[in-house]
Amino acid sequence: MQPVALPDGRRSDNEDERALVAALRRGDEDAFAEIVRRYGAPLLRLARTFVRDQAVAEDVVQETWLAVLNGIDRFEGRSSLKTWIFQILSNRAKTRAVRERRSAPFSALAGDDEDDEGAVDADRFLGVGDRWAGHWAAAPADWSRLPEERLLGQETLALVNAAIDQLPPRQAQVIMLRDVEGWPADEVSAALQISDGNQRILLHRARSKVRAALEQYLSEEGAAT
Amino acid sequence: MSAEPEDMRCNEVVEIVTHYLEGALDEATQTRIERHIEGCRGCTHYIGQIRITIDLLGRVRTDDRGEPQSDELRAVLREWRAGRPSSP
């Protein structure tokens, strides 16, 4: 069997993807194993932002793989294979989330995204009546001066991870794909089927909250030493 | 230095910082924010914090949920292939 489109630095992404799609259409197990290896973990994490239950999320991912295999002959390449796979997951996960919520009415309001809190607590700024109203009461810290081992330590990354899990679902979805997975904005909008403007607003809220969590953590740690 | 009406305030900067970093601001607002940041240590630090936040997010690994259940997935694949009209 020919090795399938393993990233070898010589193939462009497009060629790589065409080869993968062709192999999947042939029912090639290695090609399937390859897309599972690439996208399995982020798909599961994305699924968990729609349906909080781990087992249900795993189920949704499984369903997604079946839908990918069943639909690969109809895949037209208008979006990338990756975007298409994530679109399938987000559609299935949405449907599943609605169903789960119906059977658990108490969680119906959980994860409401319509918060309109500011990016930063209002009391960080000088109040109305001050000549410098709306300006920082105390300037934020310069994080570039922090020791690298503190800033990049496992504990900091664990805190970032926890902060993502605390976000409302749609904010978590956007920040995961944009900043954790490093996708460009247009691919994220396409995969989640939201407008570019909406994508940006959700990203903004998400980043603001993660920054605030980091600020709290880094200042506490600073005070402790 | 004095606050002029067209000066941007820090609490506006923090609300459009993502638009700024994404290059999504109109020209006039872009000019206002740049002029503000140039003279504001607090906002310079704040934008630095956002950039570091983005960098840290990029270092978070998603592969901490264990291996995908590859046996199951291979079974899914075999099943799917068997059901196809013209399996190779």
Image: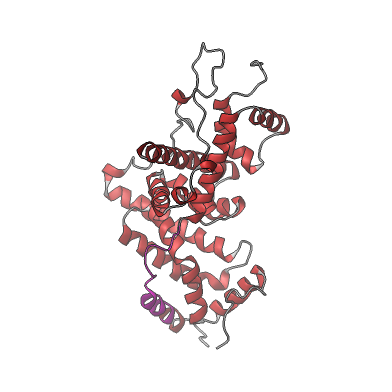
Q: Residue furthest front?
A: A225
Tell me, yes or no, whether the highlighted magenta stretch contains residue A27. no
Q: How is the image coloured?
A: secondary structure
> Picture coordinates of residue A9 (x, y %)?
64, 73
Name which quarter of the figure residue A115 lies in. top left
Quadrant for the N terminus of chain A in the image: bottom right
Name which quarter of the figure residue A26 lies in. bottom right
- Against A28, residue A39 (above or below) is above
> Picture coordinates of residue B34 (x, y %)?
68, 32
> Picture coordinates of residue A54 (x, y %)?
32, 59
Residue at 50% x, 71% y is A35
Left/right placement of residue B85 relative to residue A222 reads: right
Q: Residue furthest top?
A: A129
Q: Nearer the viewer, residue A11 or B58?
A: B58
Q: Tell me where the magenta segment starts and ends, as one range.
A: B61-78
> Picture coordinates of residue A225 (x, y %)?
37, 40
Q: Nearer the viewer, residue A120 or A205?
A: A120
